Image: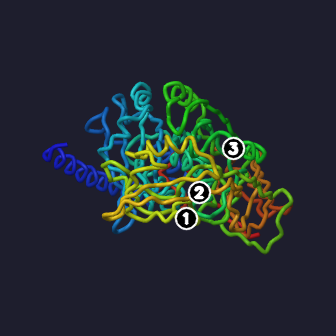
């Protein structure tokens, strides 16, 4: 990219950010003005919000636009939006979010690297006039950290201010870490999404990396379509199948699919993208589902559609139906245990850092800034060369690395550990769970170790003219006619920008 084009691109980003800020302020002022207008009755205000259709026309379509989400004073996360040629601001438009892999890097990937432009989903978006969203993540905003989860939510909800996004047709997919991140969002915060499509990911990565629990029964609330490959060096089908079977035992709404003869690559894209996208077209979100199971260890991940766990009390008795799903997963991956320097573009592999713990790299004395030039005496030019050699190795095999360290060339010797077995899910914190059902205006809730919870109500869900009855653990705790809570409804709309999930009343209960 020449210097002039780079400067113009940066100016465009600044202009876009300034324009978004201005439009957001205008939108907030408009909503707040409507909310305090006493001439507008509550029912009419609800109708205005739920039928909101005032969106600006973009200056251009058929292009990629870069935005930034300001995480804190020093960190701004980029995200790229593809606007299809036929985008119409007067028409509700589905959006597909794609999470990239390799999310644990120190820096965000360069916007110019082109993975949004090269996405196999772009042709589908062009033909069907779908928006596509490409968040960028790094070690501070990984897909399974709270900061990363909030980053994704903010991006979706911010874009809803400026683009006519169909609230019930927001889909998530991703490859490798992006697939694992798709699992994590389905397990912890599915509200904004209709369904999830993890590709060559692993369900328990988020749990194991953060050392916090995930709960397989939570996958009952959204459809999850999963694909893995048998030769994947990270997440092969022989390991993934064990977790998928466990998830089905927990009641997950799950479709699991395998491809053979493929490694950790999206080589099945040409065949699978049309199947995936056709599936998306017929799987809109249903936030008014009559039954919800939700489990959490923290209020940060306490909400699923119309139920929210606000407080957990681990001293309370655990219900018989509140189960812990666990399985031992064999770890037979051939991994040395170091992070390569992604910016190094010469022959060999430069060691950026070592993985914590008892790894083969630690055992053999590999050091930061070592330049790996041979493996078992065979020259190494890149990570692909190393991966090709590792494909013929097994746990328990000896291995040697020849490295350049300062001015010396030395050979290090080690051995891959024997196959180990680890818990698939980390249950490091006590959880609370709720089984919630409603029929007509009656809600029946069974709780386990939940101290406080909330119900979110919607005029399309219950009849506000009739009493709402709430039964918690066989006790009637509420039986009254409710009204639209104007202030809550407005605050809810301002926060999530969701015309469908326009909750008009919130009931809170302490158990």
Circle 3 sits in a helix, a strand or a loop, which is it?
A: loop
Q: Position of residue 469 (x, y in %)?
A: 77, 56
Q: Is residue 144 visible?
A: yes
273 and 219: which one is in front? 273
Residue at 41% of width from left, 27% of height from top? 123
Q: Which of the marked residues, 3 or 2, is nearer the chain's N terminus? A: 3
Label 1 – label 3 distance at C-alpha:
53 Å
Q: Quickly name the residue at label 1.
A: 363
Q: Which of the marked residues, 1 or 3, is nearer the chain's N terminus? A: 3
- In the shown orientation, is residue 253 left or right of residue 268? right
Vertical arrangement, residue 127 with respect to residue 430, above or below = above
Determine whether label 3 and label 2 are within 8 Å by CB: no
Q: Quickly name the residue at label 2.
A: 415
Determine whether label 1 and label 3 are within 8 Å by CB: no
Residue at 76% of width from left, 50% of height from top? 437
Q: Which of the marked residues, 1 or 2, is nearer the chain's N terminus? A: 1
């Amino acid at each position: 990219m020449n210097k002039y084009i780079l400067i113009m691109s940066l100016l465009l980003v600044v202009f876009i950010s300034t324009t978004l800020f201005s439009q957001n302020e205008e939108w907030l002022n408009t909503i707040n003005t409507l909310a305090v207008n006493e001439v507008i009755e509550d029912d009419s205000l609800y109708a205005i919000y739920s039928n909101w259709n005032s969106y600006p026309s973009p200056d251009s379509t058929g292009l990629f636009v870069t935005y930034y989400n300001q995480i804190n004073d020093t960190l701004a996360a980029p995200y790229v939006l593809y606007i299809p040629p036929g985008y119409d601001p007067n028409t509700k438009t589905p959006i597909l979010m794609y999470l990239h892999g390799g999310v644990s890097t120190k820096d965000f990937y360069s916007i110019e690297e082109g993975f949004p432009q090269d996405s196999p989903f772009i042709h589908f978006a062009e033909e069907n006039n779908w928006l596509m969203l490409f968040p960028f993540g790094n070690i501070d905003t990984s897909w399974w950290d709270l900061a990363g989860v909030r980053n994704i939510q903010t991006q979706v909800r911010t874009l809803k201010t400026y683009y006519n996004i169909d609230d019930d047709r927001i889909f998530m997919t991703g490859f490798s870490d992006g697939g694992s991140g798709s699992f994590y969002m389905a397990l912890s915060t599915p509200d904004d999404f209709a369904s999830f499509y993890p590709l060559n990911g692993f369900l328990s990565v988020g749990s194991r990396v953060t050392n916090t629990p995930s709960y397989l029964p939570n996958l009952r609330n959204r459809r999850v379509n999963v694909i893995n490959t048998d030769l994947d060096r990270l997440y092969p089908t022989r390991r993934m199948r064990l977790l998928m079977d466990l998830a089905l035992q927990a009641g997950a709404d799950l479709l699991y699919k395998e491809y053979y003869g493929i490694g950790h690559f999206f080589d099945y894209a040409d065949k699978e993208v049309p199947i995936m996208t056709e599936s998306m077209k017929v799987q809109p979100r249903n936030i008014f589902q009559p039954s919800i199971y939700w489990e959490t260890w923290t209020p940060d991940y306490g909400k699923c559609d119309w139920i929210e766990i606000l407080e957990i009390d681990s001293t309370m008795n655990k219900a018989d139906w509140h189960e812990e799903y666990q399985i031992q997963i064999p770890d037979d991956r051939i991994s040395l245990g170091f992070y390569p320097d992604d910016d190094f573009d010469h022959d060999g592999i430069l060691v950026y850092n070592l993985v914590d713990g008892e790894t083969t790299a630690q055992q053999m004395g590999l050091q930061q800034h070592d330049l790996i030039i041979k493996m078992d005496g065979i020259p190494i030019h890149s990570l692909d060369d190393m991966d090709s050699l590792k494909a013929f190795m097994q746990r328990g095999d000896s291995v040697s690395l020849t490295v350049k360290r300062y001015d010396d060339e030395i050979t290090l010797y080690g051995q891959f550990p024997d196959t180990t077995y680890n818990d698939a899910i980390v249950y490091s914190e006590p959880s609370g769970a709720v089984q919630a059902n409603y029929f007509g205006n009656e809600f029946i809730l069974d709780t386990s170790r939940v101290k406080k919870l909330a119900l979110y109500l919607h005029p399309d869900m219950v009849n506000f003219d009739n009493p709402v009855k709430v039964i918690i653990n066989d006790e009637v705790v509420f039986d009254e006619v409710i009204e639209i809570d104007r202030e809550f409804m407005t605050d809810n709309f301002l926060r999530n920008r969701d015309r469908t999930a326009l909750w008009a009343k919130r009931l809170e209960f302490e158990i």
